[in-house]
Image: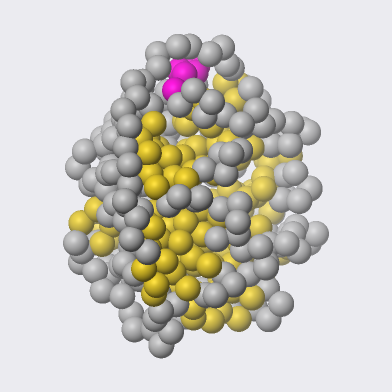
Amino acid sequence: MIEFYSHNKLTTTTSATTTVTSTTTTTSRTSTTSTMSRTSTTTTLTTTTVTSTTSTTTMATTYVPSTWLYTNSINFARDSHTASILTNGKILIAGGFNNGNFLNSAELYDPSTGVWVLTGNMNTVRAVHTASTLFNGKVLVSGGIISSDDSNSSELYDPSTGVWTLTGNMINSRTYHRASVLNNGKVLVTGGISNSNLQFASAELYDPSTGVWTKTSNMSTARAVHTATILNNGKVLVAGGENAGGILNTAEVYDPSAGLWTKTGNMSTGRMTHTATVLTNGKVLIAGGDNSVVPFNTAEIYDPSTGLWTNTGNMSSVRTAHTATLLLNGKVLIAGGDNTVVPFNTAEIYDSSTGLWINANNMNVERVNHVASILTNGKVLVAGGSGYSGQLDSAELYA
């Protein structure tokens, strides 16, 4: 039986699954982790010693005018789901968890109408899975929790038909893993947790041209609930997470051309359930997270050219399991999350030109384990998550 993170605390769930069959309904409300990695035959690692540097910056309390407006609600309240930006500008959300049930339903948001429409159901209920928009426009969903177990199954959503089709299974069942679309079109999956609650160091590659998963070299450290970020040079930065040894401050970089992992500088703080955002200057902003007990308001910057981490300004609030979205103006919007107990509706903006955080207007609803997507019009769509009374069906727009 797999353990389920709820507001960042491990609890065990034996929830039943649920299947939704409608495909045409629309909404009408308008106000709105012990560590063991499985053996891989391709374990390869190169190591580079890097010394991280730190600097101290004070947090900002400046306020920036901003607006959160309700849009139509999603058809099914959910958290721990995924959101994918389609090539037509619509947003696909899939799966998740609702009141003891795992979902296989999926919905499409049309920014031009503000309406959610149910689309085809996934073949498998799942939550805490990954979703990746491929170069061919289809969406690959992989792994996740399915009732009391995790899954190795994968399926493809075709926006032109609204139909999900099973594709090759991953080599390992996993959840709380991460998926990254590489510049060559393949998808890299890293880490995660297995049915026996063991974290993986393993990584695998999905080839859309064949529908097959193959092993690539293992990470140096088993980890789950980490971040994986595509750098401007095409490499993948993996940072933080947890394993049997505790909360990790380590980071490593995957080179797709060589299929190898290289250790890079350590973060100043071990953290999980944080966010990672590539800034317009190519650096990576890590914000918030927790060490399974204490939530953080700290943030740090990774410079790919040096492999060094530097502390930047602190957020005005501790937060974990929040969202981070790069805005069209190059700033980063942080929204929601919790302090491992109480969900937040607060939001703030990071300005990379100053290294400071600016308070933004609050969302209309407190939410954690939600999703956030940048729309083509520059607005940010936030949907679902959990609040004080359970899973949410509300959605709102930041402008």
In the foreground, 385 or 217:
217
On screen, 11 above or below 122? Answer: above
Q: In the picture provided, is 330 more to the left or to the right than 198?
A: right
**Does residue 373 appear left or right of residue 239 in this picture?**
right
Q: Position of residue 54 (x, y in %)?
A: 32, 37
Query: Which quarter of the rendered picture does the N terminus lie within?
Result: bottom left
Q: Position of residue 47 (x, y in %)?
A: 36, 68
Give the percent coordinates (x, y) of residue 206: 59, 74
Q: Is residue 268 magenta?
A: no
Chief secondary structure of the magenta portion: strand
Residue at the (61%, 31%) spot, across then down: 330
Asked if 384 appears above or below 161 in the picture, the reply is above
Q: Residue furthest bottom?
A: 41
Q: Quadrant of residue 120?
A: bottom right
Question: What percent of the width, then of the height, locates residue 11?
Answer: 24, 53
Residue 356, quarter of picture = top left
Q: Is residue 265 above or below residue 310?
A: below
- Quadrant hosting residue 104: bottom right
Specify the segment rendered in magenta: 356-361
